[in-house]
Amino acid sequence: MRKLWMSLLALVTVTLLSGCGYNTLQSGDEQVKAAWSEVLNQYQRRADLIPNLVNTVKGFAEQEKDILIRVTEARAKVGAIQATPELINDPQAFAKFQAAQGEMGSALSRLLVVAENYPQLKSDANFRDLQAQLEGTENRITVARNRYIKSVQDYNVTVRSFPSNLTAMVFGHDVKPNFTVENEAEIARPPTVDFGTAPAKPAGATQ
């Protein structure tokens, strides 16, 4: 008889937890983690391209030291942030991560604009390959970020909605920080460089 009561109690507990959004919270949390892992994967892919890109530009435009230093420093700042799974539960750490990635994207955009002034660099096969890889990676970052944004939105709705908000409170689930919508389109837009024109060569540049 005791085993029967224990079985009934377990069945009732599972039913109550399911009805209160417990399973939805767990599923949503896992989806957010998976989406976050893909965001990190694509950001790392971009970071891995930067050393070769900087070295290639340096070979043709060594005098552009300021922008090369900015890109290198931005990459170092990104690398200094411990992007652990716990980061997505810490709004301040998440904001710091987002700011560093935004700075990295801006520095890369400026670097590619500077490259416009060096015809030999633009025609270099290695540079063209790296630029194509970078654009492809930026596109993947945009897709990964959008998936993460959607996953977090769905999860946060569950955390805030009744009666699942009571279950979230009991089990320590809180809303997760998300990428801000301010300048979202501008930050996520892949750097665009028109290689069809050849502007005047700046003073001091070598052929």
Image (cartoon, rainbow, N blue to C red):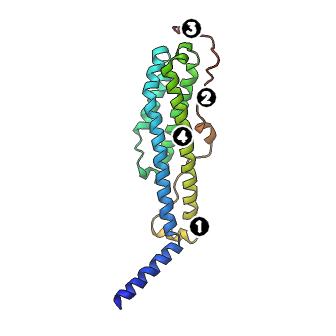
Q: Is residue 82 visible?
A: yes
Judge whether 95 appears above or below 106 on screen.
Answer: below
Q: For mark 1, what is the residue?
A: 161
CA distance separating discs 3 and 4: 37 Å
Q: Residue at x 50, y 70 (%)?
A: 167
What residue does disc 4 label?
140
Label whose residue precedes the other's in the sequence (3 or 2): 2
Along the polypeptide, which appears first: circle 3 or circle 4? 4
Could you tell me the amino acid type at mark 2? Thr
Disc 3 residue type? Ala
Q: CA distance from mark 4 to mark 2?
A: 15 Å
Viewer-nearest of labels 3 and 2?
A: 2
Specify few, some or many for label 4: CA neighbours under 10 Å numbering under 14, 14-19, or 20 or more.
many
Callout 4 amino acid = Arg
The foreground one among 80 and 142 is: 142
Q: Position of residue 180 (x, y in %)?
A: 58, 46
Q: Residue furthest bottom?
A: 1
